[in-house]
Image (spheres, rainbow, N blue to C red):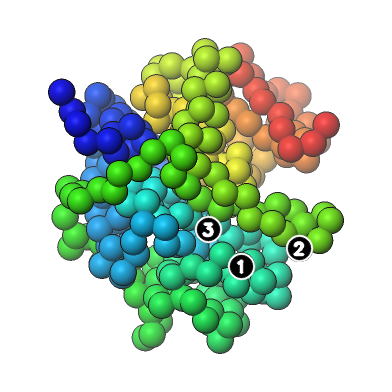
Amino acid sequence: MIQQSHFATDWLDKRARLTPDKIAVIDYSDGVETTYAEWNARANKTANYLRSLGIEEGDRVAVYASNRMEYLDLFWAAPKIGAMLQNLNWRLTVHELKQIIADGAPKVLIYSEDWRDQVEELKPSLTTVEHVVAMTSPGSDEGDIAERESMPEVLTNVPDLTMDSPWGIYYTGGTTGLPKGAVITHGNVTWNSINTITSWGISGSHKAALQLPFFHIGGPNIFMVPMVHTGGTTILCEGFDPDETFDLVEQSGITHYVAVPTMFQLLQTHDRWIEADFSKLELVNSGGAP
C-alpha cells in the first residue's frame, strides 16, 4: 500500500504509473510527442531544478511565457514541491506587471524569448526575485532552464501536501481596482477536473487542443488537466490561429475544443468556415463571455 501522501495531489505522477507509454502531449509546432512517463520525468527534473535555485514549499515561481512545453512542465513541477506558480499575463503592460510581481513576491522569474525586452525592463524592480531564468538563450546574468537536464528524474523528500495546499495564483482583471491574486488550491484543480470529466464524459480516448493562454485559468484546466486524469492527449499550440484551428479540427483527431466568443467569431468569418467538417468533434465549449 502506497503511504506517501503526495500521491493524493500529484496527478501527473499517478497517470505516468497507470499509462506510462500513452501519448500525453503533442507539440503542434514541431510534431514532437511526449508520453506520460516522459512528461512526468521532465516535470520531476524541473522540480529538482527549482529546488536547486532555493525554491521551497510556499515560495512563488513567476512565469512570463507564451504556450510552450516548458510551461506545461512548470505547471506540474512547482506543485510537486509545494511551490506556487504566479502566472503573468503577457497582455498587460510592464507597469501593470510590476505591481503584480511586487504583490506575489516571487523568488524566481522564468520567461520565454518573446518577452525578453519586457523582462529587461522589469529587472530593476524585481526586488524579491533571486533568479531570472530563460527558456531559451539566457543572458549573462540569467539561469537556463536547460540546466534541469542534469537533474534527477526521481523526486524525493516531497512535502506533505493536502487538497488545501496552494497550487498557483491567477490574477483578476482589476475591474474594481488593482488586479487581485486568486489562490488556486490542489483541491480546486482536482475537483474542477473531476466535475469536467463527469459532466462531459471525458475518457482516455479523447484528445483536445490547448490554444488558450496558459496564464488564463482556462488554459490548463480546459481540457489539459482532465486529459491527464483520464489518460487522454493534449495538443499544445503556441496560440490561436484560425487557419491552424481548421487543420486541427479536420486532421489532428481532436474530440474536444474550447474557445472564447471572439475566437469563434474569427472562425465564422474565415474562408474555410463554410466547408469545414466538424463531425469528429464530440464537444465544443464556449467560455469567457456570453
Q: How far across and how far down the image is residue 206, in percent?
A: 45, 20
Q: How far across and how far down the image is residue 171, in percent?
A: 65, 54
What's the residue at 81%, 61% (across, down)?
177
Q: Which residue is mark 3?
A: 86
Q: Are marks 2 and 1 in contact (CB under 8 Å)?
A: yes
Q: How far across and how far down the image is residue 102, in percent?
A: 60, 72
Please report whichever mark, 2 or 1, sits nearer to the chain's N-terminal start: 1
**Secondary structure beneath disc 1?**
helix
| Tag 1: amino acid | Asp
Q: Judge whether 101 appears above or below 260 on screen.
A: below
What's the residue at 63%, 62% (across, down)?
90
Front: mark 1 or 3:
1
| Pick the front one: 267 or 137 | 137
Identify the disc placed on residue 232. none
Question: How many marks do you count on the picture?
Answer: 3
| Pick the front one: 105 or 114 | 105
Q: Quadrant of the C terminus?
A: top right
| Tag 2: amino acid | Leu
Q: Which residue is mark 2?
A: 178
Q: Quadrant of the N terminus?
A: top left
What's the residue at 37%, 86% (across, down)?
140
Residue 88 placement: quadrant: bottom right
| Marks 1/3: CA–CA distance | 10 Å
Identify the disc placed on residue 103. 1
* Horizontal side of residue 120 vs 171, given as left or right: left
Please report whichever mark, 1 or 3, sits nearer to the chain's N-terminal start: 3
Q: Are marks 1 and 3 in contact (CB under 8 Å)?
A: no
Residue 180 placement: quadrant: bottom right
Residue 239 in view of the camera: no
